[in-house]
Image (cartoon, rainbow, N blue to C red):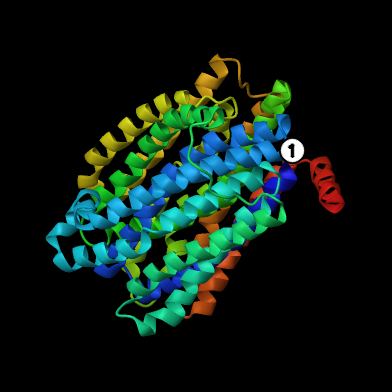
Amino acid sequence: MFRHILSVGGLTLASRVLGFLRDVLTAALLGAGPVADAFFVAFRLPNHFRALFAEGAFNSAFVPLFSGKLVQDGAASARRFADEVMTLLVIVQLVLLLAVLAFMPQFMTVFAPGFADEPEKFRLAVLFTSITFPYLLLISLVSLYGGVLNSMSRFGSAAAAPILMNLCLIAALVIGTPLMPTAGHALSWGVLASGVAQFLYLAWDARRADMTLRPVMPRLSPDVKRFLAVLGPAALGSGLTQISLFADTLIASALPTGAVSYLYYADRLNQLPLGVIGIAVGTVLLPEMSKRIKSGDEAGAVDSQNRAIELSLVLTLPAAIAFLVAGTPILSVLFQRGAFGPSDAAASALTLQAYALGLPAFVVIRSLVNGFYARHDTATPVRVALAAVGINVALKLALMGPLAQVGLAVATSVGAWVNAGLLALLLHRRGLFRADARLTRNLPRMAIAAVAMAGALWLATERLAPWLGAAGVVERLGGLVVLAAVGLTVYAVAAVLLGLVRRSDLGRLRRRRAKA
């Protein structure tokens, strides 16, 4: 499981590095003005629906059932089930796509009402979203193929697909911007092209695995009925989560120009550890637990969950500490150039620090929720999400006035901790999860290592201020590299000295990778 997590995390890291290059170019060419706000809304909206219809509810319902059919009934039966689900998915997505495209101005009035006061920004948001929204259909099929391949322990192609997205967007910025009215137009077409590229890539890999999916006559077979029964509560739960994200977009559209962009740039950095660690762990853990539970190995499933939570926290805490202590120099060095000025970097840094408060909770949620999904329980996470979203949205409304977009990020972090705490409590009460001796022993060690890293970063930031604030790009990047090296070195040394990372574990992992 660790080997697969490292494989997925490594590919995701490569994608995120390209994503940073994309964001640096985006910040320089697009800045944080009305065109940027319009594009980021157009980019966010299909991704909100993607999380609802594909990666969220869909995968939580599909992967455990497909994995179970692979174990019990074989590949042919599992393929028939996937064909039926794909047909249903395409029909639903086409209906949604046609409805949204037909009523795009009204749709934009609902999801970005603040733009209505600025006609040009509203017009651009409608145009850009009309271009990007078909991406939802393509990326939903990518998620379906990804679930199929992940269940077959072929994690590489699904993890590598986002690399294609970033390459397409970088190409759109570099090649398309001079040919189009704005960089926002070029990026919108790049989003659509990336959906085509990712779909073709995963379809090709599925063919190599003898798992090509084909549309079939729509019918409510017993397998599809069971899938829909599990999907219903999962969709409601994902819908509640998306309400919180929609609230960010909706409320930020009513804030002064730039708020949507500040949230975007901060969230892009926050998504790095969440993607590399949280999504990698969740992607591997769900089929792993599903197969163990299906074969009667409940103890093995709980042990896998403990190790996944432990690994998630060990790898996430350094990122959270770095964002909290050194958020301003990180944002300034990475994005402050061209149309993205010092005030934009400062506002984005405060937003990043607010997001960082909830980063460990966001990552742990990925492991905790799989304890329910692997047992086909999608209803309990709905109840948990309802409580978390209620607190989240209420805090957003309360904090948007005094704290602007920073208040939205604070509310998001509080909601994540509520969600993680309730999931852990319910799993424990039902006897489905208990923190074992190793996890319990290592939690305070993680905290000590994190405090040591925070102190080192604070001191290093003071000493490196001339580099980090220099006019030259090379000096600033060099200062950031040294800052990162200091923080990671202190954390790694503390982790080894405290016994948080054991040499025997590293040696065993190296041997497993060598055999692979």
Task: Return the residue at label 1.
Answer: 499
- x then y, percent, for residue 43: 37, 59
Q: Is residue 254 visible?
A: no
Q: Nearer the viewer, residue 268 or 167?
A: 167
- x then y, percent, for residue 251: 24, 48
Q: Nearer the viewer, residue 216 or 489?
A: 216
- x then y, percent, for residue 361: 49, 37
Q: Tell me which amino acid carries mark 1.
A: Gly
Residue visible at 31% across and 49% down?
406
In this rendering, position of residue 317 left or right of residue 91: right
Where disc 1 sits, the SS reads loop
Q: Nearer the viewer, residue 343 or 280?
A: 280
Residue visible at 42% across and 28% down?
382
Q: Residue furthest bottom?
A: 178
Q: Residue furthest front?
A: 217
Q: Is residue 167 visible?
A: yes
